[in-house]
Image: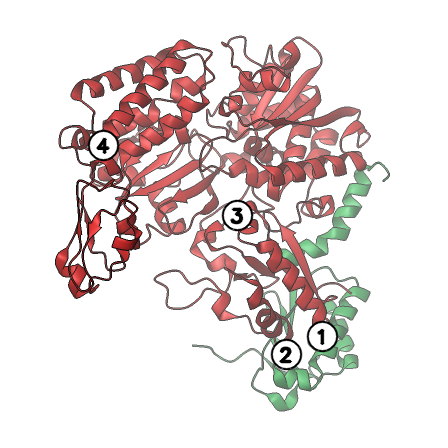
Chain colours: A green, B red
Amino acid sequence: MPKLKIEDLARMREEARRATLLREGAGRVKIIVHLGTCGIAAGGRNIMAAVLREIEQRNLHDVLVSTTGCAGLCSREPMMTVEVLGEAPVKYVDLTEGKVREIIAEHIVGGKIADRYALAVGSERAL
Amino acid sequence: MPYRVHCMVCAGTGCVSNRSLEVRDALEKEIRKRGLQDEVQVVTTGCNGFCAVGPLMVVQPDGIFYQQLSTKDIPLLVEEHFIKGRAVKKLMYTPPEAPAPIPKMSDIPFFMHQRLIALRNRGLIDPEKIEDYIARDGYQALVKALSQMTPEQIIEEITRAGLRGRGGAGFPTGVKWRKVRQAPGEPKYIICNGDEGDPGAFMDRSIFESDPHSVIEGMLIGARAIGARYGVVYIRNEYPLALERIQIAIQQAREYGLLGENILDSGLDFDISVTRGAGAFVCGEETALIASVEGRLGDPRARPPYPAEYGLWGKPTCINNVETWANVAPIIMHGWQWYSEIGTERSKGTKVFSLVGKVRNTGLVEVPMGITLRQLIYDIGGGIPGDKKFKAVQTGGPSGGCIPAGMMDQPIEYVAPDGKREARDYLDLPIDYESLTDVGSMMGSGGLVVMDEDTCMVDVSRYFLAFTQDESCGACTPCREGTKLMLDILNRIVDGHGTMDDLRALEEIAWVVKQTSLCGLGKTAPNPVLTTLKYFRDEYLAHIEAHKCPAHVCRELNTYRIDPVICVERGHGCGVCRRECPEKAILGEKNQPHRIDPTLCKKCGVCVDVCHFNAVIVE
């Protein structure tokens, strides 16, 4: 193991940062993939894998991926919800791996909602 | 592919004893079986703090808190949470009065009121990976101290922050560092005191186990500030896991060149060795500890000279507690202003407490100085289990004292930081070094034992005195003979043979031992006796005059009888007590009331424990 310099320490910190960011539950964006029975049957797990691959390829450090159950609109699965910090959540439906790549590029990196794939902005009222 | 889920499995000593490592292995196996090994990472962490509900695990990034896990819960958990995305309610924590489980760790009252500085990385990193520590800004404070600050500036920062020794005495850390820096003599030494000996205290152990690098970084900054070349971590041999983790951490730091020569090209040379204590309580006292490091018998010596001038191998030595060292890096990182805004006028920052005894949420908590006992025991601790009444809280271990709940409605005078005097309940007393000393106890290293109505205060003081008497090194007469005499008297009292003369002698000897002993062990050993005599004198009198133990703890003073009505109507004379009694002192036939023959009864209390119908009455 070579002896560390101050720059090495800073680089190591950046590299390891993504892991601990996730543990703190802090991120700019949260992508929630719907994995109810319907979501899984419609190929939701491939969608999740695509999301994770895309995050890695683009080297995004501030995106968390989470899962949830059925959103109640089983006919439009696979679905995912994108929550950008401080903005209303957006639900995307009828996903494919290609659409996932486009959504990440436009919405998460570009900051503009990919409305052609979006079902709606916002969520139902709970309680 | 990056992981999307991190399972932070607690592997503190408490959870490991509850088989958390088996739970972890089962989890890893199930994750592989389901093909999720590239998505879900299992991380073994140090103590999470909520020891009462272990084995436990936090699932990130959603912060879902799972508790009391067993290996058979794992298949369901993996299927529901990681495959279907549904957190499992039945494995979550539900507070006693709450209508539903609380999914998120951050919403659980036990965690909500805490503020983590010394324990900033607990549960968030794998303590055996230096990379995890570095990711959480680890060693960045060292970089700042080496590249942007002079040693004087570091000492000034620590002094102005108001950091005080967390081992119990509360000596200002910056002042100590300056003394060592200015003392003539080379080389200078730094010691980390990890000889945590108070019964029921596990703050230091937890820091070593959950974040050992925080101690190393603090010591490195201290080394730079005072000009030390060598450091020693003194750790109890009874802490095998803590010992292993600090050794791994030191080895990693050496490999990365964070210990050794010319650290980070700054010209700083510093290395740390580990000394294992052999389990003598007195070695927590600094001069005894130094003797022990030197390979001599762990006997204390008179001070002055203080270790700052004449310490390890006769050289200037800076000795601080584990928790103190863990506080150093955040102060350097965020500045003294940030730190000094937390806490009270004279006690800054946070304090780690091990909250144990008759309290629902036992565990390890870190709270801002100035929090009240009520908040600590009720808001964080969840109050007293069962319908029992809160009686007292013991702080400072065998050197501390008991603060009574009986004073709850009897306000005491509290002097606010602005000098204003006001009446406060004991329970609403803000905890800091001074306020605890004012009521006859002390901060100590942070042990906090909650006691309810079933605790006998005479027995408690006898317990602590038996401990200090056993641990007294014998070097000075007041402590060696005095603690023995006091223990003899207390044993007589709990056995029902005490007299009023005994009580007077007890008090007198206690004061002599307190005032004339050589070291801190003897000077503080009478504190449990003196505070219980002050606040619970009636219990002593009940033992001596009425030959009764009000809490029914001292068995020699109890009498046992069986309520014939309950025995027959509820228990139908089941005979369990008759079969279990080792003295064959219980007589009776099936369906008939049983009774105890007082001439045969040895008062062992087995009948109370085995009776399902609470028919055995203790008086």
Query: Helix, strand or loop at disc 2?
Result: loop
* Image side of residue A118 versus residue B173, left or right: right
Q: Is residue B565 above or below residue B408?
A: below
Query: Helix, strand or loop at disc 3?
Result: helix
Task: Report the disc number at residue A120.
Answer: none
Q: CA distance from mark 2 to mark 1?
A: 9 Å
Labels 3 and 1 within one chain: no
Task: Report the disc number at residue A48.
Answer: 1
> Quarter of the image holding residue B559?
top left
> Quarter of the image holding residue A1?
top right
Question: Residue sitting at 60 percent across and 74 percent down?
Answer: B85
Q: Pointer 4 indicates a residue of which chain?
A: B
Residue bearing the label numbered 3: B14
Residue bearing the label numbered 4: B536
Q: Is residue A42 above or below residue B126?
A: below
Q: Amino acid at mark 2?
A: Leu
Between B141 and B134, the residue placed more toward the observer is B134
Q: Pointer 3 indicates a residue of which chain?
A: B
Quarter of the C terminus of chain B within the rendering = top left
Q: Are marks 3 and 1 in contact (CB under 8 Å)?
A: no
Q: CA distance from mark 1 to mark 4?
A: 64 Å
Residue bearing the label numbered 2: A35
Local packing at callout 4 (Cα closer than 10 Å; few below 14, some 14-19, many 20+) is many
Q: Are marks 2 and 1 in contact (CB under 8 Å)?
A: yes
Q: Amino acid at mark 3?
A: Gly
Q: Pointer 1 indicates a residue of which chain?
A: A
Question: Residue sitting at 55 percent across and 31 percent down?
Answer: B324
Q: Position of residue B58 (x, y in %)?
A: 57, 59
Q: Position of residue B354 (x, y in %)?
A: 46, 41
Q: Amino acid at mark 4?
A: Phe
